[in-house]
Image (cartoon, rainbow, N blue to C red):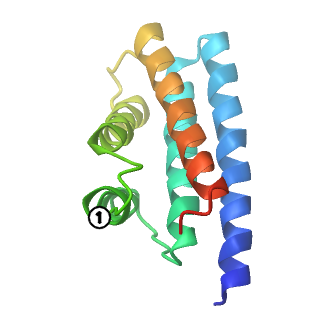
Amino acid sequence: MDKEYYDALVKVRMDRARELYDEAAGLLEKGSYKSANNRAFYAMEKSIKALLAMKQIDVATHNGVLKQFNYNFIYKGDDAFFGPEDYQKIAGAEQIRNASDYDDFYIASKGETKKLVENTKCILDKIEKYIMAGNI
């Protein structure tokens, strides 16, 4: 696949990430915390997949996305744009999403969900800024 394909993939994935974020924010307002947690995590993941596409990396699993982000943008990152705190926000989002989706007895709180949605916006904005600056 060529550069044009990956450039298009970056745009499509960021558009979808913003759409997922909007869904998460709307679900938070409605009090649907578990569903908001799900959408917020997927917004983060989709934006990371856009970031990876800039390096022509495509990953199929949640775990693979996190590992590739950590390796390529934190561990190996030359510009220190992303840091361990970004990885922690994303890893924390995955834990909350897993609990929301699979733990029948998990009770999602408004405060936790609000923080997750805020973290999601932070990650999306940061990734978008990185992409727009053409750092790859």
**Residue 42 percent coordinates (x, y):** 54, 45
Q: Residues within 10 Å of mark 1 (few under 14, many from 20)?
A: few
Amino acid beneath label 1: Tyr
Give the farthest residue toward the bottom. Answer: 1
Residue depicted at x 43% and y 9%: 111
Quadrant occupied by the N terminus? bottom right
Which of the 4 image quarters holds residue 7? bottom right
Q: How many marks?
A: 1
Q: Position of residue 40 (x, y in %)?
A: 54, 34
Could you say which is closer to the camera, residue 48 or residue 129? 129
Q: Nearer the viewer, residue 122 or 20?
A: 122
- Residue at image x 32%, y 34%? 92
Q: Give the percent coordinates (x, y) of residue 23.
A: 69, 31
In the rendered image of this protein, does residue 7 appear above or below residue 47?
A: below
Above or below residue 118? Residue 61 is below
135 sits left or right of 94 in the view: right
Q: Nearer the viewer, residue 89 or 101?
A: 89
Report the side of 122 relative to 67 (left or right).
Answer: right
Observer-nearest residue: 28 or 51?
A: 51
Indicate left or right for 81 with 50 as reference: left
Up-down: is 96 above or below 6?
A: above
Left or right of 5 in this view: 61: left
Element type at mark 1: helix
Residue for badge 1: 71
Residue 123: x and y in percent read 50, 39
